[in-house]
Image: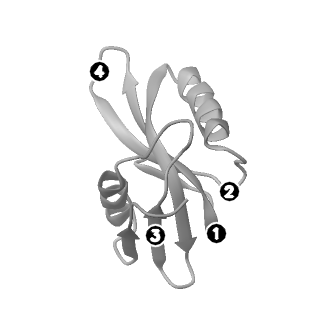
Amino acid sequence: RVPNVEIDGGGVFFFLLVRVRAAGGPGKDVVFFYGWAEYHADIYERTAQELARQGLDCECLGGGRLSHRPEERKIHVYGYSVGFGRADHSVTTEKLKAEYPDYEVTWADEGY
């Protein structure tokens, strides 16, 4: 019921990689990227609340920054979250490539 990627527009913002699961079920990793978030914790708090309403649990696997340039069809994943640590950018990138097959999706461990 939860999409693999939730992105709400273009720009450079925080993202989280979150494992979502139903009680006792297998997990699914999801990328959440919201332009309204001032901090990574804002994304996690809102996401956890929304998922709980659906009867789902979640665990934050880390975060970073994401540069989404829809006009150029490019997404770049980089950086880390001070509070949650660095997401596995290779996993995040694969999720994004599957969701945006006509985009150039890249990643780097450098930057904040």
- Residue 11 horizontal side relative to residue 65, left or right: right
Name which of mark 3 and mark 4 comes first in the sequence: 4
CA separation in Å, label 3 and label 4 = 31 Å
Residue linked to disc 3: 76
- Residue 70 horizontal side relative to residue 88, left or right: right
Name which of mark 1 and mark 3 comes first in the sequence: 1
Circles 1, 2 touching at the beta carbon (< 8 Å): yes
Circles 2, 4 touching at the beta carbon (< 8 Å): no
- Of residue 109 and residue 91, the one placed in the foreground of this image is 109
Instruction: Tell me, yes or no, if residue 68 can be seen here.
Output: yes
Name which of mark 2 and mark 4 comes first in the sequence: 4
CA separation in Å, label 4 and label 1 = 34 Å
Q: Secondary structure at mark 2?
A: loop
Name which of mark 3 and mark 2 comes first in the sequence: 2
Across and down, in percent, residue 97 comes to 34, 66
- Residue at left offset 27%, top offset 26%: 26
Give the residue type that dot 1 points to.
Answer: Gly
Give the residue type that dot 3 points to.
Answer: His
Residue linked to disc 4: 25
Residue linked to disc 1: 11
Q: Nearer the viewer, mark 2 or mark 4?
A: 2
- Residue at left offset 38%, top offset 66%: 107
- Residue at left offset 55%, top offset 59%: 112
Name which of mark 4 and mark 1 comes first in the sequence: 1
Across and down, in percent, residue 91 comes to 31, 52
Give the residue type that dot 4 points to.
Answer: Gly
In the figure, residue 57 lies in which quadrant? top left
Give the residue type that dot 2 points to.
Answer: Gly
Furthest-bottom residue in view?
A: 72
Circles 3, 4 touching at the beta carbon (< 8 Å): no
Residue linked to disc 2: 35
